[in-house]
Amino acid sequence: MENHSSLPSRLREIIEDFQYSEGREKIELLIQYAENMPEIPAELQSNHSEMEAVEECMTPVFVQAQLHNGKLNFYFDVPRESPTVRGFAAIMGEGLSGCSPQEVLAIPNDFFKRMGLEQVLTMQRMNGLSAILAHMKRLAAQSLSD
């Protein structure tokens, strides 16, 4: 696995929180992120069609990236009934918002394995986490070409 220093500082802090937690605590931390996920901005609520679906996820996950002054902000809409996926989306939004597109593209595809989530989540859920990151990377790459 790649060095922690290749990750944005906020994402590194989140990973460390998960590394210090064990078993059920990891799920509780994930649910805490889910509960604290910010609502999508009003303009996206009224124009939800501007958000992109992460098709690979069984849970309905919608995301939008906005580029301001060379920095990305990610907005997610994930049902409250899917707390693990919602929690991971919240982590990604918090951990990567304010990053440049290049920083997002540099995130290792398996970075979340450092969090130990495979101990408490099914492989299907882990695949969903990979799909969310892959979609965020596509949006970051797209922002470079716009």
Image (cartoon, rainbow, N blue to C red):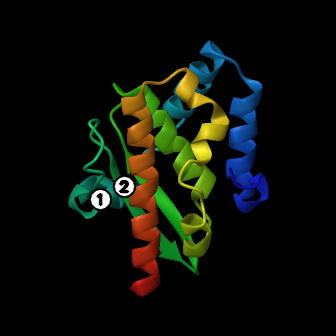
Mark count: 2
Residue pointed to by mark 1: 51
Q: Which residue corresponds to the image point at 25% horizontal and 56% vertical from the top-left?
A: 48
Badge 2 element? strand
Q: Quadrant of residue 143?
A: bottom left
Badge 1 element? loop
Residue pointed to by mark 2: 63
> Mark on residue 133?
none
**Going from the N terminus, do you reach mark 1 or mark 2 first?**
1
Q: Is residue 124 above or below residue 1?
A: above
Q: Disc 1 vs disc 2: Cβ atoms closer than 8 Å? A: yes
For the residue pair 119 and 70, the one nearer the viewer reads as 119
- How far apart are the two marked residues, 1 and 2, measured between alpha carbons? 5 Å
Q: Position of residue 22 (x, y in %)?
A: 69, 18
Give the residue at the far left of this rendering: 49
Q: Quadrant of residue 23?
A: top right
Q: Which residue corresponds to the image point at 53% horizontal and 54% vertical from the top-left?
A: 109
Q: Residues within 10 Å of mark 2 (few under 14, many from 20)?
A: many
Q: Amino acid at mark 1?
A: Met
Q: Amino acid at mark 2?
A: Val
Q: Position of residue 18 (x, y in %)?
A: 69, 31
Q: Position of residue 112 (x, y in %)?
A: 59, 42
Give the residue at the far bottom of this rendering: 145
Q: Which residue corresponds to the image point at 46% horizontal and 64% vertical from the top-left?
A: 137
